[in-house]
Image (cartoon, grey):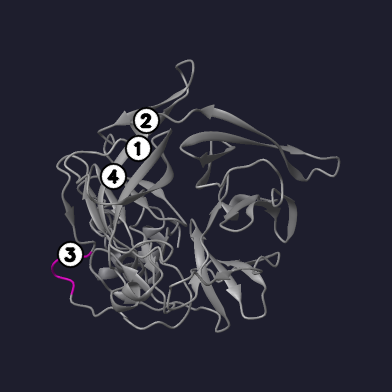
């Protein structure tokens, strides 16, 4: 019997032991029968890649650097699922799937994309977050919401903007957005808002109203033990869907340098809260267990993963990356990145001890680090 005749059930067992997307792709490339049989196997999702500032991708936990086709004239400012959000040198924006090389043209959103902060040595890429209610590949009329640091929120169906809240008053700064259950939610001053979307006469989605679902509470920002009361912190919130629940993950980052440079140094702790829509009034409920899941969080893209022996993901852990865009990230692309264990509060490196692949440490563009979540069928 040749290798190409390996029974599908044995091939499935091998694939389940390969959480790395790159390893799965290599296995499928061995021969046509392996590729055909591999695509039929029910597998846990592959571990995400980390998109680096030089346009390459980092596989975790092995640390392999992977090159994928990327436009020469574009920089990556974020991602949504397995699509990269690109800004081109001519100001045009697009979404690109680096696996299929499919692209979606977006409106020109690049105005004000770079902001120089007083006291900072370089231009910093402005933060943005994209969210979709359903996978772009399966949507006939894909809907995309993008939150931007300087102009708030924009709703579009590529390539047309259908609505924006730029200039609308009153509205506090949006800290995070995410679709959950087909509805668009946002974090504003630790409050959870539902941003209701309705169709106009031309069947284009419009922003109807902002409805406060959960009020803020002192518990959300009470400094966890044993964090020092002498240090200053920022608290970065992330919205993540996990096992049918909407979670808010608060990341406590210690700052070594004063604002306005925003050069924060180390993540000390994470707090997780579930949006309890059952109680009246609705409230945030503290969560100490992720129920067999792990979370991957970043400013541009967050997702939950089932943990287990074959998934390569550690249960009740939060995988995080640096939120920096300054000189420290140039010197160390994984500065302030790691895996936080919710049970014991210990953070370990993002890469395994066996990883020996050198990471690029040079600055070649204004890209932000972002997760890239591959789909199962590749």
> Which sits earlier in the primary sequence, circle 4 or circle 3?
4
Tell me the distance, in whole angstroms, between the alpha carbons under discs 2 and 1: 6 Å
Q: Is residue 279 magenta?
A: no
Q: Secondary structure at mark 3?
A: loop
Q: Are marks 2 and 1 in contact (CB under 8 Å)?
A: yes
Marks 3,2: beta carbons within 8 A = no
Q: Residue at x 60, y 58 (%)?
A: 150
Measure the alpha-carbon separation of dots 4 and 3. Answer: 21 Å
In magenta, the rendered stretch is 351-355
Characterize the local packing of mark 2: few (<14), some (14-19) or many (20 or more) Cα atoms within 10 angstroms: few
Which residue in the structure is indicated by mark 2?
218
Residue 352 disc label: 3
Residue 193 drawn at (x, y percent): 56, 34
Whole-number angstrom distance, CA of label 1 to CA of label 3: 32 Å
Please state the horizontal and vertical placement of residue 71, each as a whole percent of the image: 56, 80
Q: Residue 93, position in %: x, y?
A: 64, 69
Image quadrant where one finds the N terminus? bottom left
């Amino acid at each position: 019997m040749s290798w190409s005749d390996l029974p599908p059930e044995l091939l499935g067992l091998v694939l389940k032991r390969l959480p790395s997307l790159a390893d799965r792709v290599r296995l499928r490339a061995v021969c046509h029968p392996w590729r055909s049989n591999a695509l039929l196997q029910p597998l846990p999702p592959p571990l995400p890649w980390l998109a680096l500032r030089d346009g390459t991708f980092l596989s975790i936990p092995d640390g392999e650097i992977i090159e994928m086709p990327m436009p020469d004239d574009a920089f990556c400012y974020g991602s949504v699922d397995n699509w990269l959000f690109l800004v081109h040198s001519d100001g045009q924006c697009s979404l690109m799937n680096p696996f299929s090389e499919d692209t979606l043209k977006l409106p020109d959103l690049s105005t004000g994309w770079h902001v120089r902060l007083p006291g900072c040595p370089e231009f910093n890429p402005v933060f943005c977050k994209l969210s979709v209610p359903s996978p772009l590949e399966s949507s006939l009329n894909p809907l995309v919401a993008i939150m931007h640091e300087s102009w708030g929120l924009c709703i579009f169906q590529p390539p047309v903007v259908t609505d924006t809240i730029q200039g609308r008053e009153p509205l506090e700064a949006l800290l995070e957005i995410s679709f959950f259950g087909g509805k668009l939610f946002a974090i504003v001053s630790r409050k959870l808002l539902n941003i209701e979307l309705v169709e106009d006469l031309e069947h284009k989605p419009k922003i109807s109203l902002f409805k406060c679902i959960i009020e803020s509470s002192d518990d959300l920002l009470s400094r966890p033990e044993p964090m020092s009361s002498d240090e200053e912190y920022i608290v970065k919130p992330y919205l993540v869907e996990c096992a049918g629940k909407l979670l808010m993950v608060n990341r406590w980052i210690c700052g070594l340098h004063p604002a306005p440079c925003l050069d924060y140094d180390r993540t000390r702790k994470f707090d997780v809260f579930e949006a309890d829509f059952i109680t009246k009034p609705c409230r945030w409920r503290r969560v100490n267990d992720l129920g067999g899941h792990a979370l991957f969080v970043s400013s541009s893209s967050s997702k939950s993963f089932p943990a287990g022996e074959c998934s390569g993901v550690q249960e009740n852990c939060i995988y995080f990356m640096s939120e920096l865009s300054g000189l420290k990230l140039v010197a160390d692309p994984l500065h302030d990145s790691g895996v936080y264990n919710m049970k014991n509060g210990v953070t370990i490196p993002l890469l395994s001890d066996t990883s020996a692949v050198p990471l690029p440490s040079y600055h070649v563009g204004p890209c932000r680090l972002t997760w890239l979540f591959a789909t199962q069928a590749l």
